[in-house]
Amino acid sequence: MSTIGYKDWAVDLAEVGAIYPFQGWEVAMTIVGVIFWLGWHRIQFVREGEHLEKAKKMGDPEKIAKALERY
Amino acid sequence: MDGNLNALTTVFTEFYYWVTVVFMFLIHVGFCMYEVGASRNRNHMHTLMKNIMIIPLVTVTFFFFGWWIYWAFPMFPFFGGLDLEAGAANVPWSETMGTNLGDRITGVFWAAFLLFSWTAASIVSGSVIERIRSSALWVHAVLIGSVFWIIDAAWGWHYGGWMVQYLGYHDAYASGVIHAIAGGYALGVIMVLGPRIGKFAADGTPRDIPPHNPWLLTIGIFLIYTGFWGFYAACNVPAISPELIDGQITGTTWTATNIYLAPTSLSAITFNFLMSLSGGLMAAYVVSKGDAFWTFSGGLAGIITASAGNDLYHPIQAMLIGAVGVVIVYKLHYWVEKKFKLDDAVGAVAVHGYAGFVGLVISGFVLWGAPSSPYEGYAAINPVGQFLGAVIMFGVLGFLPGFVVAKMQAAAGVLRIPEEVEIQGLDYAEHHAYEDAKAAIIAADKAHLATKVTPAE
């Protein structure tokens, strides 16, 4: 058994195409990939919103003035 | 790969594009340094993170659908349907979109286009620093990097694109397909986003917000120049036979070609790259009276203005076109800023958008009547086609979607950071935690030292 379809390289390379594991599962891998991408956006969007809400009330005027001076 | 010559050509082409990709990475490094240098201390980390995360987000989406768009959209939707046959080899579940010994070109060719996508997104990123929400920018990055620029590439930067066939559109090194569209998109976003606090005085006079670190800016733009070399090489097909082009070229002489498979050479574009860079630098120095920011950016704008025709221009033409473009761009930037109260933080709309637009229009006159393609029946290069092309790139595929999506984000309250956060700085929480941690550890060390030191007698 080999996940890439070849157990050894005793082959004519002219006859060889794809050599990645789990050939035939490309559509399923794509669906997983798209969920991963969209999920990332969702997580980041929610976290950033929460962070900005908190950050609005976080500022200490003295520290902010120092930060402004520092440019 | 039948035969040694075929094998050598394939491996050379694979390596050629791979090298261009590595060079083009420097464009992104340069953009990051430029943005961080231009931003103020209190926004550094968020500014950097905003640009860095463009890399993975545009990469995965360009894998999922961007690359397919390029192959499926050349005539869609106005002059034909989707080219599903060409697209089939470029969907994410195709066998050629992975480790495949029967195809050594798709991966590197995909990556070369992908690095253009990063550039398009990064151009937009620069103009909106210090006040956009990262989540909002990253949606724009995916849209410009994996949807709109690649639609324009299918239409006007593909040997079978409808703009090439019917308008005679010619844009060899992407004045329009990357720079005008990204500049137009950035303009659409900043019109909705609004200026940074303090950018305009109460009477509407614009204030300069000087870069926090001019040296970082300088290194950044020099890295962009360097990466631009790779970008130019990546726009060419390095070696191809007339038989493979299957167009009107006769004889058996192999050649390098532009993206339209029309002949040019690396030597020609090296002449023109350097001469348009020089024309841009010289004109910018004069028009800005030696302002460092504008002089360096003018070099870039010079190349961008000449890029549409830099496969065919004479080097002196490239120099003069670069120079003319920079003068127009400089004047236009300040006029727009003052008139419309727009805050383009790094001058991206001007350097990329206006320069790209102007470059397309100029090339329509200078290259009038030259073949846009080696294929029979295509329109020749002409001023009307180039002007319409510039409008499509800057306005239709750039400005319009940027403006509409930003409007939607603004309506939902997810475009701009709160005013309090803008004043205290996006990095305030991190700075605060850093300063607190620093104070705590210093106090602890001092306390420890006090227990160990014996007072002097």
Image (tube, grey):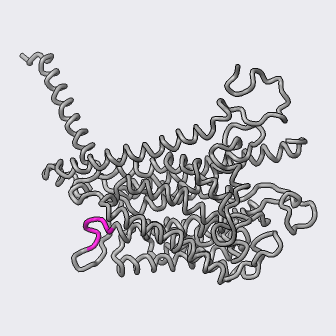
Question: In the figure, residue B215 lies in which quadrant?
Answer: bottom left
Q: Residue at x 53, y 60 (%)?
A: B120
Q: Residue at x 34, y 59 (%)?
A: B132
Seen in the picture, residue B305 relative to B226 is either above or below; the reply is below
Residue B27 x %, y %: 54, 54
Question: In the figure, residue B335 lies in which quadrant?
Answer: bottom left
Q: Is residue B230 left or right of residue B198?
A: right
Residue B165 x %, y %: 73, 73
Seen in the picture, residue B28 relative to B104 is either above or below; the reply is below
The part of the chain drawn in magenta is B194-200
Q: Is residue B397 left or right of residue B434?
A: right
Near-viewer residue (B23 or B354):
B354
Residue B341 x %, y %: 33, 76
Placement of the N terminus of chain B among the 4 image quadrants: top right
- Residue B196 shown in magenta: yes
Q: Residue at x 31, y 48 (%)?
A: A48
Placement of the C terminus of chain B among the 4 image quadrants: top left
Q: Main secondary structure of the magenta part?
A: loop
- Residue B218 shown in magenta: no
